Image (cartoon, rainbow, N blue to C red):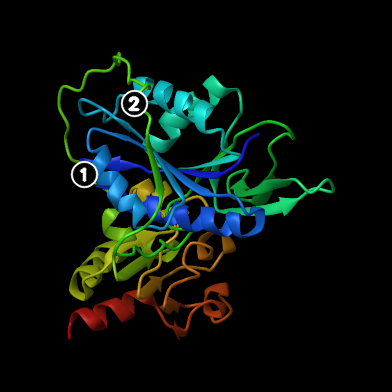
Amino acid sequence: MANGICVYAESYNGELETVAAELVSAAKGLAETTKEKVQAIVLSDHAEELVKELDKLGVDEIYAVKADHDITLQDDAVSAAIAEMLKKIEPSAVLVPATPQGRSIFSRVAMRLGCGMTADCTEVLAAQREDGSFYIKQNKPSYGENVFVTILTKEGIYPQMMTVRPGVYAACEAKESGNANVTFLDDIKIEKSGVEILEELPAENTTDSILGAEVVVVGGRGVLEDDNFELLEKFAEKVGGAIGGTRPMVDSEMIPFNHQIGQTGLTIRPKICISFGVSGAIQHTEGIKDTNLYVAVNTDENAAIFGVADYGIQADLKEILENYLTL
């Protein structure tokens, strides 16, 4: 019988990605209700080192497959191996990071297992049926972020598989050591991939700066006018902040999509967030609700953003930015 809340531990260059600790937090939350074990799976040519890091996150079981070479971007071969792992482990649910790697690999895994997959969840909740069995409510924005829907996997179909957006769960704190039951599945081999990596180039724009930034400067529709975005960039540089934005900023190509904040973008937890010209639609504010200190600048005294911000300034953003930059 399917049992266990399983997390895919994504890694890159032998380093565990932060999102793995976030998914462990989500899994532990589900397990508080279902009373299942929290599991993790890892495939890597650095499997032994990654297992040690995973153990510190307080999971109950770790299943690992050692690769004899770097398997980065070889998603065809990796997905086949993961499908075999899950057949052996038989978890009731699998939590996957909603990252390019996670989406690419587990869409293939879901096809192999015939289980389906819910994409881009912002919340996962355990619920109980009348017969005492548990299932997961998979909540996510839909229809261009205009509605919030709950998706359920059909009863009797396992594992319940879902991708979860990075940033929506706080990462669990690592301990000095753990006591997970570790199993290396040496009988599962990673087959030869049809993908050959010729060269890797760094991305021009990454989410690392905004997800890990202590200060984030957010631009809304008001920044699109005149030379306001140039002023915003100078302000962000002066305060040592990363730049994020609302959907209009992305649509106008002022910022890349992976710097969009909100239900269809990123969820951030900076120490300080300062927004300029942001109206305060819930589709955006869902991505900044856990900010420690939030300051908003808007000309409209009735702007919804003032109901979210700790401090609000009713003023023209250009005037505020120009005055600050002259200090």
User: Few, some or many C-alpha atoms within 10 Å of disc 1 (few <14, some 14-19, many ≥20)?
Assistant: few
- Going by the image, does 201 lie left or right of 73? left
Q: State the residue position of label 1.
A: 204
Q: Where is residue 12 in the image (x, y as percent from the top left)?
A: 25, 41
Q: Is residue 29 visible?
A: yes
Could you say which quadrant of the image residue 30 lies in? Answer: bottom right
Q: Which residue is drawn at 47% across and 31% down?
A: 106
The amino acid type found where label 2 is placed reads Asp
In the image, residue 156 sits, relative to residue 11, either above or below, namely above
Residue 216 rendering spot, x and y as whole percentages? 33, 68
Mark 1 or 2, closer to the camera: 2
In this view, the residue in front, 37 or 260, is 37
Expressed as whole percent of the image width and height from the top left, the position of residue 116 reads 60, 29
Q: How many marks?
A: 2
Dot 1 amino acid type: Glu
Q: In this view, does 74 lie above or below 202?
A: above
Q: Residue furthest right?
A: 130
* Quarter of the N terminus within the rendering: top right
Residue under label 2: 186
Q: Nearer the viewer, residue 189 or 320?
A: 189
Looking at the image, residue 142 lies above or below residue 28:
above
Query: For residue 277, what is the image quadrant?
Result: bottom left
For the question of whether residue 254 can be seen, the reply is no
